[in-house]
Image: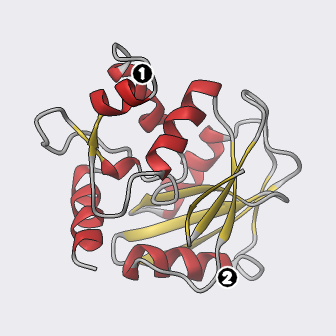
């Protein structure tokens, strides 16, 4: 288990293992559009950003194809409010536990991302070198693309080697807005 910041505590599952039990989810609104938060018994397993409820549900189902999904807006209201507060204001009252899957390499990348201070960026190449794999820039980008925990695992803090913003699973405009918000706090 590692601590990312005051808002999130990560618990990494064994590489390749699936979340245990059903996944409950709720959808809310932020300044960046809609957000879907989903939770297992261990913690938040996905934070997805989008503009359409059905598309968010479909993205969750694609991320966890073998899981049973249950809409549960009432019981997830505290977590959803905390995530929205983090997205909109950069803080939350209590840390949220994360249930993080992925391959061993993805987990290494995500741990490195968690260490990047809010408002700062690193290039894909810098992260690859930091991980001792200087030729793995594309693999780092692939790990970022596989991340289903928007803002909690801050893939928005990774940029191209020239400092320009590049792809982001939830859109470059959201990436730009997240970084601007972090730098303005």
Number of other residues with Cα within 10 Å of mark 1, as a class: few under 14, some 14 to 19, many 20 or more? some
Q: Is residue 15 left or right of residue 106?
A: right
| Residue 170 in view | no
Please tell me whether mark 2 sits on a helix, a strand or a loop. helix
CA gap, disc 1 and disc 2: 35 Å
Q: Residue 20 appears at what percent x and percent y?
A: 87, 46
Counting residues from the start of the chain, the first of labels 1 and 2 encountered is 2
The residue that disc 2 covers is: 77
Name the residue at 36% across, 33% down.
127
Q: Residue 145 appears at what percent x and percent y?
A: 43, 36
Q: Is residue 59 above or below residue 108?
A: below
Q: In the figure, residue 95 lies in which quadrant?
A: bottom right
Extreme-right residue of the structure: 21
Name the residue at 64% across, 33% down.
102
Name the residue at 41% across, 28% down.
140
Q: Which mark is residue 139?
A: 1
Give the label, 1 or 2, closer to the camera.
1
| Residue 177 in view | yes
Number of marks in the image? 2
Extreme-top residue of the structure: 135
């Amino acid at each position: 288990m590692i601590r990312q910041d005051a808002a999130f505590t990560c618990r990494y599952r064994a590489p390749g293992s699936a979340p245990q039990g059903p996944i409950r989810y709720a959808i809310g609104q932020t300044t960046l559009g809609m957000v879907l938060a989903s939770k297992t018994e261990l913690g938040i397993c996905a934070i997805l950003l989008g503009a359409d409820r059905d598309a968010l549900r479909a993205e969750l189902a694609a991320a966890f194809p073998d899981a049973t999904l249950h809409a549960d807006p009432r019981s997830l209201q505290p977590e959803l409010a905390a995530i929205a507060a983090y997205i909109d204001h950069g803080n939350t009252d209590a840390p949220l536990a994360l249930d993080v899957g992925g391959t061993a390499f993805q987990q290494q990348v995500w741990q490195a991302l968690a260490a990047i201070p809010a408002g700062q960026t690193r290039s894909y190449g810098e992260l690859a070198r930091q991980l001792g794999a200087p030729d793995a820039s594309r693999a780092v980008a692939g790990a970022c693309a596989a991340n289903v925990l928007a803002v909690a695992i801050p893939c928005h803090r990774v940029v191209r080697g020239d400092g320009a913003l590049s792809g982001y699973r939830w859109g470059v405009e959201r990436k730009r807005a997240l970084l601007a918000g972090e730098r303005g706090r």
